[in-house]
Image (cartoon, rainbow, N blue to C red):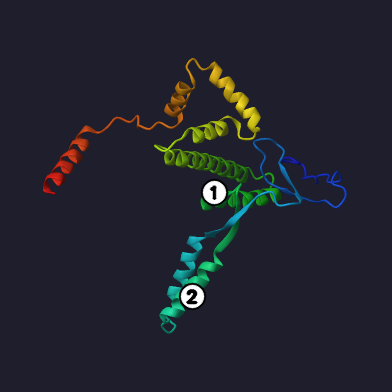
């Protein structure tokens, strides 16, 4: 859809005939190419399960409002406790947004959302100033920062459930985790066939394969060497506390 020089074109939605409601939006994402990605939306049944709503508060703007209110209070009569708390709630609600969470997006990171909103704002400015090279560099830097932060969030979201599974893994949990690692988009039959190929290609039996997977992805013991000086101090403290009891 368009490029860095020519004007954006409109997509053809004539293929959606009948009583289908179709819309499209410009994502502003080009993945490093000259063309941008469109996001078509076809209204239909709800395919995701809503979980609730996430509250995102713009705390810097909230602090600015409270600082302005503090300066104004020097010339106004003192507020009662009830009036003061009501004013704080009102200011917080002014800078708080509610975003619906689903099974596909169970949580929302405010910093990543702020980065993408800033990027969308810069892209809107760039559409009116396509020859502004400085603006293009800012968009590229912001995109790179958002990609790094998203990769960090992805790693943290993967390490968190892995840490919670330490010491309480069962065979069924290992198999479900292994099936998700292979390809969670495939059917159960395809995943079972892939697992059978892995078991037959492994030099050992199924128990050895499970042990190898656990050592690789979910090690129970840390590979970091222990600090002897600190360990000795903790051991001496535990011995002393035990003898005092």
x, y percent for residue 222 = 35, 32
53 or 218, which is in the foreground?
218
- State the SS at label 1: helix
Which quadrant holds residue 167? Answer: top left
The quarter of the picture where the N terminus appears is top right
Callout 1 crowding tier (Cα within 10 Å): few <14, some 14–19, many ≥20: some
Q: Name the residue under label 2.
A: 87
The residue that mark 1 highlights is 112
User: Viewed as shown, does residue 17 lie left or right of 152?
Assistant: right
**Where residue 164 sits in the image (x, y, percent)?**
43, 41
Q: In this view, does 59 lie above or below 176?
A: below
> Separation of disc 1 and disc 2 at Cα?
29 Å
Image quarter of residue 223:
top left
Dot 2 falls on a residue whose secondary structure is: helix
> In the picture provided, is 44 more to the left or to the right than 165?
right
Residue beneath the point at 21% across and 32% down: 228
Name the residue rendered at 65%, 29% in the picture.
189
Query: For the residue carrying disc 2, how many other residues have a C-alpha within 10 Å: few (<14), some (14-19), or many (20+)?
Result: some
Name which residue lies at 72% across and 38% down.
Answer: 35
């Amino acid at each position: 859809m368009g490029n860095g020089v020519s004007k954006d074109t409109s997509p053809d939605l004539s293929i959606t005939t009948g009583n289908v409601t179709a819309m499209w939006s410009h994502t502003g994402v080009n993945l490093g190419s000259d063309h941008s990605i469109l996001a078509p939306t076809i209204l239909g049944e709800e395919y995701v399960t809503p979980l609730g709503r996430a509250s995102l508060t713009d705390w810097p703007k909230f602090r600015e409002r409270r600082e302005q209110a503090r300066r104004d209070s020097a010339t106004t009569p003192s507020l009662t406790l009830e009036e003061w708390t009501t004013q704080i709630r009102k200011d917080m609600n002014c800078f708080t947004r509610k975003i619906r969470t689903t099974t596909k997006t169970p949580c929302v990171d405010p910093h990543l959302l702020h980065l993408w909103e800033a990027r969308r704002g810069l892209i809107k400015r760039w559409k009116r100033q396509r020859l502004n090279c400085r603006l293009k560099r800012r968009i590229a830097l912001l995109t790179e920062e958002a990609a790094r932060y998203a990769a960090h969030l992805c790693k943290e979201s993967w390490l968190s459930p892995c840490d919670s599974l330490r010491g309480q893994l069962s065979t069924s949990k290992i198999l479900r985790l292994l099936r998700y690692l292979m390809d969670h988009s495939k059917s159960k039959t395809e995943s079972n066939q892939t697992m059978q190929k892995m078991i037959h290609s492994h030099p050992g039996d199924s128990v050895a394969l499970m042990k190898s997977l656990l050592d690789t992805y979910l090690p129970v013991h840390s590979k970091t060497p222990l600090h002897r000086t600190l360990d000795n101090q903790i051991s001496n403290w535990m011995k002393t506390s035990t003898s005092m009891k």
